Image (cartoon, helix red, strand yellow):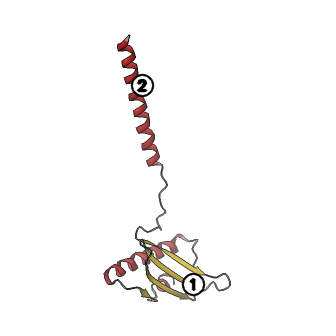
Amino acid sequence: MKKLIASCLLLSSLLITGLTLKAQDEDQSTAPRAPKWVSEKGYWVVESNIKTPYHSIIHFYNNDNVLVYREKVDGVKINLNQKRTKMKLKKILEQSVVAWENKQAMQDNAQLVAKALR
C-alpha cells in the first residue's frame, strides 16, 4: 500500500512539473514581437503641428535617451501611417546612432530625412 501511494505521489509530481514547463514554453512563444520599423538601437520622435503639416522637427535618440541627431524638415509632409516612412526613419536612426558612437557629437540638420522622404 505504501508503494502504491509513493508511486502515485511521484507520478503526480512529475505530471505537474511537466505541465508547468509546457505552460512556460507556450507563454514565451506567444509573446508579442516588435514591428519591423522599431529599432534596437534607439527611437525617434516627430514634432509637427496640424496647422503647419509641411514643417516638422525629428529627434533621434539612442537607448540611453541621448539626443544623437535632430533635423528640421520643411516642405515635406511626413506620413507616419506608412510603413515605408517608418522604415526610412529607422534606417536614418541607425546611421545616426553609429555616427554618434564614433564621434560622440550630435549632428544637426544634415538633411538625411529630407533626402530620404523626397
Q: Is residue 56 left or right of residue 112?
A: right
Q: Is residue 67 above or below residue 10?
A: below
**In x, y percent, where is residue 37?**
47, 68
Residue hosting label 1 = 56
Q: Secondary structure at mark 1?
A: strand
Comparing labels 2 and 1, the label whose residue is closer to the camera:
2
Contact between labelled residues 1 and 2, with CB atoms less than 8 Å apart: no
Q: Secondary structure at mark 2?
A: helix
Give the residue drawn at x 34%, y 79%.
101
**In x, y percent, where is residue 51?**
68, 84
Q: Residue furthest front?
A: 2
- How crowded pointer 2 is (Cα within 10 Å; few <14, some 14-19, many 20+) is rated as few
Say which amino acid is labelled 2.
Ser
Front residue of 111/67: it is 67
Residue hosting label 2 = 12
**In x, y percent, where is residue 39?**
43, 69
Q: Is residue 113 above or below residue 6?
A: below
Query: If you read the primary sequence from the N terminus, does the residue marked by circle 2 or circle 1 appear first?
Result: 2
**In x, y percent, where is residue 63?**
42, 71
Q: Is residue 18 above or below residue 87?
A: above
